[in-house]
Image (cartoon, rainbow, N blue to C red):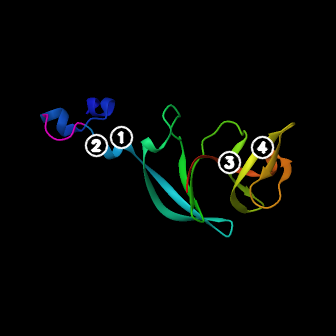
């Protein structure tokens, strides 16, 4: 059992040499919770199964991924981030959730753009849920 935990190999293969060495589903597929945005609210929409090769080589896989469906576009959002920088983000503004482009400006402020008119606000004035790491159109 210790060998299974350390290697990730199937117990049957380790004990008998029969069957698959690894469960390919667990190694190559990410099961990502999926939500959809309806009128600014997030609703559960099942699970998205995504092959890890979908992500660019050399880039780390998202640590806490979620899939967000907004219209006909799916966004893979990493809810694990240490700092906000210029990019697309899933945010909540006054109770409404959307994908927006955030641009850092001096003294803990951001320019929020992407839907309607752009505006500047304090970084703590909006709830940042996660960074968009992949867009599927």
Q: Distance between the residues labelled 3 and 1?
A: 28 Å
Q: In this view, does 103 lie to the left or right of 47?
A: right
Q: Which residue is drawn at 63% across and 39% down?
A: 81
User: Which of the two discs, 1 and 4, sits closer to the camera?
Assistant: 4
Whether residues under marks 1 and 2 lie with C-beta atoms below 8 angstroms apart, the answer is yes
Q: How far apart are marks 3 and 4 (CA)?
A: 9 Å
Q: How far apart are marks 1 and 4 (CA)?
A: 36 Å
Seen in the picture, residue 5 relative to 114 is either above or below; the reply is above
Residue corresponding to mark 3: 88
Dot 1 falls on a residue whose secondary structure is helix
Q: How crowded is mark 3: few (under 14 residues within 10 Å), some or many (20 or more)?
A: many
Q: Residues within 10 Å of mark 4 (few under 14, many from 20)?
A: some
User: Which of the two discs, 2 and 4, sits closer to the camera?
Assistant: 4
Residue situated in front as seen by the camera: 42 or 133: 133
Q: Residue at x 70, y 36 (%)?
A: 83
Q: Which residue is drawn at 27% across and 29% down?
A: 3
Q: Which of marks 3 and 1 is nearer the N terminus?
A: 1
Q: What stretch is highlighted in magenta?
A: 17-21
Residue corresponding to mark 4: 103
Q: Earlier in the sequence, mark 2 or mark 4?
A: 2
Whether residues under marks 3 and 1 lie with C-beta atoms below 8 angstroms apart, the answer is no
Q: In which quarter of the image is the N terminus?
A: top left
- Quarter holding residue 4: top left
User: Which of the two discs, 3 and 1, sits closer to the camera?
Assistant: 3
Q: How far apart are marks 3 and 2 (CA)?
A: 34 Å
Residue corresponding to mark 2: 23
């Amino acid at each position: 059992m210790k060998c299974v935990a350390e290697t990730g190999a199937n117990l049957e293969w380790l004990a008998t040499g029969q069957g698959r060495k690894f469960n390919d589903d667990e190694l190559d597929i990410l099961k990502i919770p999926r939500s959809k945005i309806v009128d600014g609210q997030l609703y559960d929409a099942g699970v998205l199964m995504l092959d890890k090769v979908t992500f660019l080589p050399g880039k780390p896989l998202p640590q806490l991924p979620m899939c967000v469906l907004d219209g006909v576009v799916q966004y893979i959002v990493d809810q694990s981030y240490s700092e906000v920088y210029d990019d697309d983000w899933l945010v909540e503004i006054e109770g409404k959730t959307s994908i927006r482009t955030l641009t850092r400006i001096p003294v803990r402020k951001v320019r929020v753009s992407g839907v309607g008119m752009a505006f500047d606000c304090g970084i703590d004035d909006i709830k940042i849920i996660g960074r968009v790491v992949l867009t599927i159109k």
